[in-house]
Image (cartoon, coloured by chain):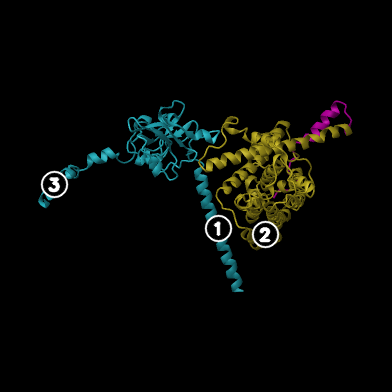
Chain colours: A yellow, B cyan
Amino acid sequence: MSSPAVVTPGLDLQASFLDLLDGFGVSQGLAHLLWLPLPMLTVLVAAVVGVLVNVWLERKISAAVQQRIGPEYAGALGILQPMADGLKLLFKEDIIPARADGLLFTLGPVLVLVPVILSWLVVPFGQNLMISNVGVGVFLWVALSSIQPIGLLMSGYSSNNKYSLLGGLRAAAQSISYEIPLALSVLAIVMMSNSLSTVDIVNQQTGAGIFSWNIWRQPVGFVIFWICALAECERLPFDLPEAEEELVAGYQTEYAGMKFALFYLGSYINLVLSALLVSVLYLGGWGFPLPVEWLAGLLGQSVDAPAVQVITGTLGIVMTVLKAYLLVFFAILLRWTVPRVRIDQLLDLGWKFMLPIALVNLLVTAALKLAFPAAFGG
Amino acid sequence: MFGFLKKVGDYTQDAVGAAKYITQGLGVTFDHLRRRPITVQYPYEKLIPSERYRGRIHYEFDKCIACEVCVRVCPINLPVVDWVMNKATKKKELRNYSIDFGVCIFCGNCVEYCPTNCLSMTEEYELAAFDRHSLNYDNVALGRLPTSVTSDPSVVPLRELAYLPKGTMDPHGVAAAAPRAGLLPEQVLASMPQAPASTPAATQPSASDSAASDA
């Protein structure tokens, strides 16, 4: 609804960092080289800390829903429990089953984790608070998430175990069938914002605060995207690949120690990532429910003032994370509400329900864009 | 054409219905978030076992007459009664008695049939051991009384649901003197009219009367 010209450049840490080093007399090339690892490390740490928080939330909320207490003794309120879990996995023996395919068995978890972490490349926490503003941002994420089923299939096949194989096949089938409605609902958003870049998508949702968020213009797309994201993360209504009552642990059955930890990490990073992307695509990303420019004007401050920039930048990060974790909370609540679907129901839902609805949603969005170019980003 | 529209309509109805039910379910789970945990924090809190709890068996050596009824009523003849016949006094002399709680199913038949009441059920249920052979209790081990949950200072005793005052669901912070819901057996007996209590006495003479008339 707002043209990009209105959008302020916001906090640019890279420029400030390069200027600072330039002031110390460091050459441009060296300064850039020094800058490069910083955002990557930050995002990697953020992703892992996000997972720790997520695991803790999952255990505490699950406990509360079931009228239990949950982890209590590892740190205050059990906040160190995820650390303890992780450390335990770190120290456990790394087992490769005797008749398994060693190479594929090792490669599987890596192939599952790497695309997920790579996808954090395109998650914006602010105007310039992301690793790289790739022009094809969302498309990159959709493409990267298609690599995951290969890793799952690989680990399922190489484990030399019937449960693993079935779990891997299920995971692949599930990922493939939910990829399409997911991509279609993303396409509707892309059509509205005329860009694949996540920053542009968020910028297109600023201007009128909460009312300019995409969720009002794409309610169906939002629901479809969220359901598909849950299916991609193998969250509970769709956790057939690792359904413990039927398949022991699916493709993870033969894994122990650090390799299992990689799967675990991957699934939780994926959940946080999906929640972040839902908040970016549908809930205005780093946008505050009230327009920041308006608030700054109310306080008589310029949006470009350094202090205001720092505050808006912090607010952006807080808002993105808050929205993402609200969605994670919703996912956890959903986990204890909805029973697991059968494999045929899962595929039915994906192909016979989500796909047509997503297609219709896309067509309707296109029609609305032609009819009301002002409201739908013409 | 209309068939297709009807299909779309049914479809939408299904979707709306599903959404409604899922929202209802989410409401239920969300409501549970604000409820107090109902779990018992075991080593620190313990439930008080009910009166007729069938726990580890207690045995009094001095009361036992070595009749071996417990062995005969036991489904697997578990109790080991080690006695010898004293030829001089022509009486059984009990040497040892043991029950293996690794095998016992706590059915309570031995307690039920013991003619001298030397066997009884305790409320002890914490029988974990590192070695299954240490679960084979001899007469000394069988003679020990368990620590009561209520008298253990390191444990918060919690009442089970049936023993809570009326309307209370949470055993935490219930006063020890608060009476449980309903009447105790003594109270039921006290509230009953006196007539049924005297019937056995009344029937006694009539039975003897009939016996007399028969004679």
Subunit under mark 3: B
Look at the image and give the residue range highlighted in magenta: A1-28
Q: Amino acid at mark 1?
A: Ala
Q: Position of residue B92 (x, y in %)?
A: 36, 33
Q: Say which residue appears at 67% left-offset and 35% top-offset.
A: A88
CA distance for labels 2 and 3 = 93 Å
Q: Nearer the viewer, residue A205 or A322?
A: A322
Separation of marks 1 and 2 at Cα, in angstroms:
18 Å
Q: Mark 3 or mark 1: name the one nearer the start of the chain.
A: 1
Residue lying at 32% horizontally and 38% vertically, measured from the top left:
B115
Residue A294 in view:
no
Q: Which residue in the structure is indicated by mark 3?
A: B208
Name the residue type under label 3: Ser
Disc 3 from disc 1: Cα separation:
76 Å
Q: Residue furthest front?
A: B88
Determine if marks 2 and 3 fall on one subunit: no
Tag in front: 2 or 3: 3
> What is the three-letter code of the residue carrying label 2?
Ala
Q: Tag 3: Cα neighbours inside 10 Å, few (<14), some, or many (≥20)?
A: few
Q: Which of labels 1 and 2 is toward the front?
A: 1
Q: Which residue is mark 1?
A: B18
Vertically, is A25 above or below A166?
A: above
A10 within the magenta span: yes
Q: Give the residue pinned by disc 2.
A: A358
Q: Residue at x 60, y 67 (%)?
A: B8
Q: Residues within 10 Å of mark 2 (few under 14, many from 20)?
A: many
Compared across the picture, whether B166 is left or right of A270 comes to left
Q: Residue at x 13, y 48 (%)?
A: B206
Label 3–label 1 contact, CB within 8 A: no
Say what secondary structure mark 2 lies in: helix
SS at mark 1 in the image:
helix
